[in-house]
Amino acid sequence: MSALDILMVVVRVAFSAFIPLCFIAVCVWMERRGAGFFQDRSGPNRANIFGFRAAGLVQNLADAAKLIFKEDVTSGHIKHKFYFVLAPLIVFFTAVVSFAVVPFADTLVLGGKSYLMQGIPLDLGILWFLSFVGFSVYGIILAGWSSTNKYGVLGGLRSAAQVISYEIPMGLAIVSLLVVYGTIHLNEIAQFQGQLLFGFIPMWGAVLQPLGMVIFIVAAFAETNRTPFDLAEGESELVAGFHVEYSAMKFAVFFMGEYVALFVSSAMIVTLFFGGYQVPFLSTATLINNAKPVAFLLMIAVPVAMHYFAGWIRRSNVSHYPRENDPRVFEAEIYIKCFWGLVIFLEVVLLLILFADKGGPAAHIFVMLLQMATFLVKITMMIFVYIWVRWTLPRFRYDQLQRLGWQTLLPLALLNIFVTSAVVVALS
Amino acid sequence: MGATVKTLPRKGASLKERLYLIEIVKGMATTFGHFFRNLLDNRRLYVRHYPEVQPEIPVRWRGRHRLTTHEDGSVKCVACFMCQTNCPANCIQITAGERLDGRTEKMPVKFTIDLLECIYCGYCVEACPLDAIRMDTGIFSVTGDKRSSFVLELSDLLASKGAFAEEDYKKGGA
């Protein structure tokens, strides 16, 4: 095992372990500011460090400090304290681990060796994801049961029933996908989506399997316990559902697990249906061969984008009431300088690419970084869709939820398998 | 004479609506419109930047109480107990004493209002025959760090001034 091998292992594990954790902060921030903007409010924008509010991100720090220093109550009526503590850990652990098989860049070829860019280089692919997502509901059921609280038990019960009804359409939607892709390996699925249909449409799962995409996304919403399927914690009837007895960090672990699950399920939707890490219209080989033109175009595009972004920051980050020597204007100027610094750093990196060998290791690494960035941008957009849906749709009633799962999604998924298989057989 | 019956059409039965997805997309377009408008220009948020920007308090708004005074600064209240009797929350406690300045016979020695009990109904203001108690201070946020700080004494009630001009207050339906 050479030093490069060890470095690659560290990089891959670090990416797939820390990026979901970092995205907790991003998700919470997007959720709150997004909710505010969807409802014509401003969202949290007051918490600051020396006047710097970072568009509301500092609020996350304040919340974290609050949750860490709050009293961690375990009520006396709870008999099974071990399971009570274990439950949030299961939810959090399964959510983090299920990201391990998602590829975040194409296979990296360095020094004649190829490295699979995912946390654990397993061939299990989508089966690993399905098994861990299915397992995470045990955390919720266990939490509801061990709380010895009727609201908790009802929340856990609902969650169990919901997961059973939605695992099946989700699995069947994946079956029809596997018929199309012919592999369970997520990296091969992403590579497949790098091709072009009729020469101009990206061959994404969304194009090949529109019905499967709708079924999978609906089921994924139910799996992550997000609105409109968040019956397990329906506060209007169940107070807080399965986490009603949890406080402080135990609650925070549930909360974080929920957001990691949101991130992972967005990553899964992106990998299966929106081309994964593929840059639209540009496959990995094209990118490696044309690394220099791409880098040159980026060198022009990034400062232009930054110019408009700076204008937006300047317009948005002001006090909306008369105020002498508005400190927010100064704050905005500091942010703009930070972002320009970042842009200059990017420009230097891109310049190095321009002077590097054609098709050499620098081009490979550049393409890898580009694909990682694309992947994260796609995931962020998918998370936005989750948030968007949450602040648009009301919660389903429980019987409507079951009817949708069993009477609508299940037959549709079966029909989808049938039609897809017929088409695949006819074409081959 | 029967009541007029208006039959409202029930929505949600047509195939287009039962497909859910079309209606969901329409709803999401609406919310995204709001999001995008606010993202581009956050001046348009329907938000008052409290506490920097205070809300406008209308004259008839029932704020924290005060006791009015004559021109010479002596208290108007004659300790008739009308407000205390009329108070549905029993938050007013008056102790009457002899008045020596010749205006009337009685005056309050102690006049306490427990704001934690008060429901801000304004019955005390309506009951007062001498316009001695008013709720026109415009104070809407009462804060304190202990219970006793919410119990207003006679001196506190006399200290606060009305927030509006006298003619506006009279016009406001007092």
Image (cartoon, coloured by chain):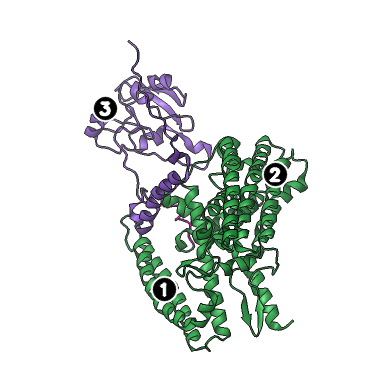
Chain colours: A green, B purple
The chain letter under disc 3 is B
Q: Residues within 10 Å of mark 1 (few under 14, many from 20)?
A: few
> Eyeballing the image, is A173 above or below A347?
above
The answer to whether mark 2 and mark 1 are in CB contact below 8 A is no
Q: Tell me the amino acid under the disc marked 1.
A: Lys
* Residue B108: quarter of image: top left
Query: Does mark 1 fall on the same chain as mark 2?
Result: yes
Which SS does the magenta portion mostly show? loop
| Marks 2 and 1, how far apart at CA | 49 Å
| Marks 3 and 2, how far apart at CA | 60 Å
Residue A69 visible within the image: no
Pointer 2 residue: A141
Q: Tell me the amino acid under the disc marked 2.
A: Ile
Q: What label sits on residue A337 in the rendered view?
A: 1
The chain letter under disc 2 is A
Image position, residue A406 (x, y; %): 61, 41
Image position, residue A247 (x, y; %): 65, 47
Query: Does mark 2 fall on the same chain as mark 3?
Result: no
3 vs 2, front mark: 2
* Quadrant in which the C terminus of chain A appears: bottom right
Image position, residue A148 (x, y; %): 72, 38
Pointer 3 residue: B173
> Eyeballing the image, is A72 above or below A330?
above
